[in-house]
Amino acid sequence: MSKVKYKFNPKSLTYEKVKVSWKERGLRFLSYLATGTVFAAITIALAYKFLDSPKEKQLNREIKAIQLQYELLSKKMDQLNSVLADLEDRDNNIYRVIFEAEPIPDEMRKAGFGGVDRYKKLEGFANTELMKETTKRLDRLTKQLYIQSKSFDEVVKMAKNKEQLINSIPAIMPINNKNLKHSPSGFGWRTHPIYKTSEFHPGMDFTSPTGTPIYATGDGTIERADNMAQGYGNHVVINHGYGYQTLYGHMSKMAVKAGQKIKRGDLIGYVGSTGLSTAPHVHYEVIKNGEKVNPINFYYNDLSPEEYQVMLELSSKSSQSFD
């Protein structure tokens, strides 16, 4: 039951019952309610300011976990950068040097990305700088890896071409002369066997019995196999590519045809004395970029240093060629 309140009336010297109207009761209720609401709002505001809600605590834990992941990612990128820098150094200073290719400049390897708005979508967050910097590093690393991958593709291609070049360059003698039994007439000024005049001999002559096999000294394509050139008789010309050609003259018989692909060591004909010749032999020439050069510099697959010295002495002593 609600308590009844009394008020003393000094005029009548009596206590009178206090009567509260519904309006006053309503105002009192509203004042209590307002006071409670204000107090509750202040309490909630202070709680939000100084105390984390369960959801905020969970979000903070997730943010810290993400920050830790970014830090770990940054360390991994540091390791990758170190490995990539080593690969780039070896690529520029070893691989590309071996294959005579220009190194890739750092300006190209580490060039930035265009566009000021590239990372705009990462702005407006509490960890914007961390996310932007990590993303930039990842983009740079990705581009460097792409450039390095392309460089290695070029190196592989150059290696294949280098192997083909090595196989194509003349590197053996045209006949089996391992024991140097067939004394050569060398490159240079010699007495012509028929005209008895001093003429420049643009190749080397290897004496050998008629029918001795003659071999290709490098990979290539048969450019000529005929007897239409003056003085050479039955002869074969091989185009090795890379500016190299070889000529084999005075054959008794040819074993190849023009356009035929051959490998180093393949049989191309037999020793003879056709054309302007005084005895069975093979006249051998090496042509580099249209200029006839000394074939003695192209026997490194056949001869040891000692054998090469003997060959050099034999070829320089001969005073007369056989054609």
Image (tube, rainbow, N blue to C red):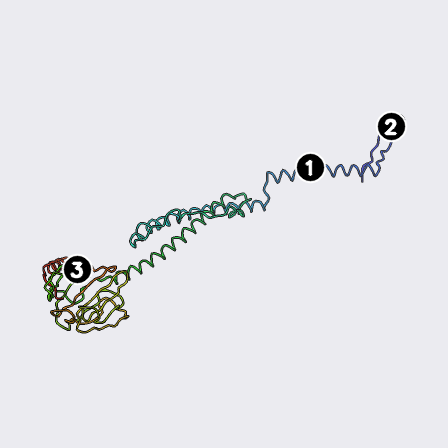
Decide which of tag 1 and tag 2 comes sooner along the chain: 2
Q: Residue at x 29, y 53 (%)?
A: 98
Number of callouts: 3
Q: Are marks 2 and 3 in contact (CB under 8 Å)?
A: no
Task: Check whether the beta carbons of the residues at disc 3 and disc 1 lie within 8 A of each other.
Answer: no
Dot 2 lies on which element?
strand
| Secondary structure of residue under mark 3 | helix
State the mark number for residue 296.
3
Q: Secondary structure at mark 1?
A: helix
Amino acid on which the number 2 mark rests in the picture = Asn
Left or right: 56 in relation to 24: left
User: Where residue 128 appears, x then y in whole percent?
Assistant: 52, 44
Q: Earlier in the sequence, mark 3 or mark 1?
A: 1
Three-letter amino acid code at disc 3? Ile
Residue where numbered disc 2 is placed: 9
Q: What is the quadrant of the C terminus in the image?
A: bottom left
Please determine whether, in this image, residue 25 is positioned above or below residue 253: above
Question: Identity of the amino acid at label 1?
Answer: Phe
Location of mark 1 (residue): 39
Give the foreground label among 2 and 3. 3
Label 2 or label 3, whichever comes before in sequence order:
2
Disc on res. 71: none
Mark whose residue sits in front, 1 or 2: 1
Depth check, front residue: 13 or 274: 274
Question: In front: 298, or 283?
Answer: 283
Label 1 CA crowd tier, 10 Å (few <14, some 14–19, many 20+): few
